[in-house]
Image (spheres, helix red, strand yellow):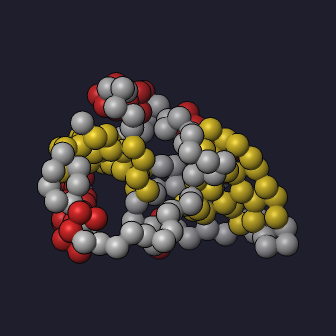
Amino acid sequence: MLKKEAKELQVLETREALDVTSPDRGRRASTVVLHHAAVFVENLDRSASFYADVLGLEVTDRAHLPAIGIEQVFLSAGHKHADLVLARRLNGSVAPPDKRELFHLAFELPREQPFEEFLERVSREGVSVVAGPMERPARFDGSGSRTAAYLRDPDGYLLEVTQEH
C-alpha cells in the first residue's frame, strides 16, 4: 500500500508540475497570496499537540464560535498569527477519512535543520512516514533540488515536509 501511495504522489506531483506555468516563463504576478489553511479535525487538542510537538508550530489562539457551530485553534509557523487553523464542529460531526477532499498540506523545513534528524524525531513521536524521503526538483523548470517526505496527521490528512538544498 505504501508503494502504491508513493507512486500516486509522484504521478500527481508530475501532473501539477506540468499544469503550472513557472513565473520565469511569463506567468503574471499573483494579486493574492495564501493567507492560511483551515481543516476540520476530530479532536482539537490531539491535533494541536501533533502540529505543535511534531512540526513545531505554535498555538497562538483559540476561538469558540457557537453562532457558526465551530471551535478553532490557530497555529503559527512563524509567518503570521495563523498559518494553519484547526476547526471542530460543535455537534461532533466530521467526514470520515476517505471522504475528505484535501490533497495535502506542505510544510518547509528550515535548511539548518537536518532532514534525517527531523524524520527520526517524527518516528520517535510514533508518526510513520508514508513516502520518502525522496529527492525532487525544487522548481517547476527542474532547477534546484529539495528533499520531501510525506506523513499523516492524527486525522489522516497527508502532510508533505520539504526542504530545499
Q: Looking at the image, which residue is at 15% across and 50% down? A: 143
User: Please, is residue 164 above or below residue 27 in the view?
Assistant: above
Q: Is residue 97 visible?
A: yes
Is residue 46 something that shows in the picture? no
Q: Position of residue 27 (x, y in %)?
A: 29, 72
In the picture, residue 40 is in which quadrant?
bottom right
Q: Residue furthest left?
A: 142
131, above or below 16, in the image: above
Estimate the x, y position of residue 158 in percent, counting from the top left.
40, 56
Which quadrant is the C terminus positioned in? Answer: top left
Q: Is residue 43 left or right of residue 90?
A: left
Residue at (21% x, 68% y) in the render: 25
Q: Quadrant of the N terminus?
A: bottom left
Q: Say which residue appears at 23% left-offset and 54% top-offset.
A: 139
Front residue (pair 38, 46) = 38
Q: Is residue 5 left or right of residue 100?
A: left
Q: Position of residue 63 (x, y in %)?
A: 79, 55
Report how many numbered discs are placed on residues in the image.
0
- For residue 47, side relative to residue 104 (left or right): right
Residue 117 occupies which quadrant of the picture? top left
Q: Which image quadrant for residue 121? A: top left
Q: Is residue 114 above or below residue 131?
A: above
Q: Position of residue 90 (x, y in %)?
A: 77, 65
Residue 95 in the figure: left or right of residue 106: right
Residue furthest right as drawn:
67
Q: Identify which residue, 39 or 164, lies in the foreground.
A: 164
Give me the residue at 39% from left, 43% from top.
108
